[in-house]
Every structure is written in structure tokens, then in C-alpha cells.
Image (cartoon, helix red, strand yellow):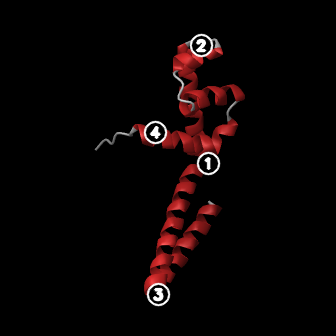
Amino acid sequence: MITQVTAMERIVEQTLLYDFYGELLTEHQKQIYEDVVFGDLTISEVAKEQGTSRQSVHDMIKRCNKILKGYEDKLHLVDKFIRTREKVEKIHSLTGEFLRTGETDCVRQIRELSRQISELELK
């Protein structure tokens, strides 16, 4: 089954990749990427502002996306961040449940999740 990535999912992915790896782009790449992806300017507007062609701006955005994804493929920082955030949210939920019910299994699950988070940091 082929899943279609929504525009919102693409924006979230681009934002996370840029947050983690954007500083590794050149100033020129960052300026164009920020204008198009975050500034909501059209490729035509950025091309005019930069004194270049629409095609070169389009190519720059594609190249930046490829560079950012390449860093993620090698370093996996965004993936680790997402997995850690999910585990922390689960810990938060379990602590609330424990406080309400006193269920000791919650403590065991919290300990396991915290161990997993510690292991994520080492990888």
C-alpha cells in the first residue's frame, strides 16, 4: 500500500530537518530555503529578489532537501528526537495513571522506557 504524504507532514519533516541540520547549509542556501519553505514566498518572488531564475531557486530547494535528508540518513538525530519524545510522552501518561491508581505496573513500564531513552542517547 502506497501512502501519500500530506503537505502538512512534508512541512513538519522539512521543519525538523532544518531545525537539526539547517546550520550546516551555506548562508545562501539557508536564505533561499527559509524564504520559500518558511517565508511562504513563491519561487518566482525569491528568484526576482535574488536576481536569478526560477529554475535555479527550484533546484536549490531540491538540493537543500536532499542535503538535509542526507544528514538525517547518516546521523538519525530527528529519528532519535521523535522516538525520545514519544517515550517521554508515554512516561508522562504512566505517571498520571500511577498517581490516579497506584498501579505498580506503571512504575515497571516507566523504568523500561527510561532505560530505552538512555540507550537512544548512546546510539
Q: Which residue is mark 2?
A: 48
Mark 1–mark 3 Cα distance, whole angstroms, equals 37 Å
Q: Which residue is mark 1?
A: 75
Is residue 102 shown above or below 32? Answer: below
Q: What secondary structure is marked by label 4?
A: helix
Q: Which residue is mark 4?
A: 10
| Of pointers 1 and 3, the one earlier in the residue sequence | 1
Q: Which residue is mark 3?
A: 104
| Of pointers 3 and 4, the one earlier in the residue sequence | 4
In screen coordinates, is 4 left or right of 96? left
In screen coordinates, is 105 left or right of 63? left
Name the quadrant containing residue 47. Answer: top right
| Of pointers 4 and 2, the one earlier in the residue sequence | 4
Q: What secondary structure is marked by label 2?
A: helix
User: Relative to the observer, which residue lies in front, 38 or 55?
Assistant: 38
Hey, what amino acid is under mark 3? Thr
Mark 4–mark 1 Cα distance, whole angstroms, equals 20 Å
For the residues carrying marks 4 and 1, which lies nearer the camera in this image?
Answer: 4
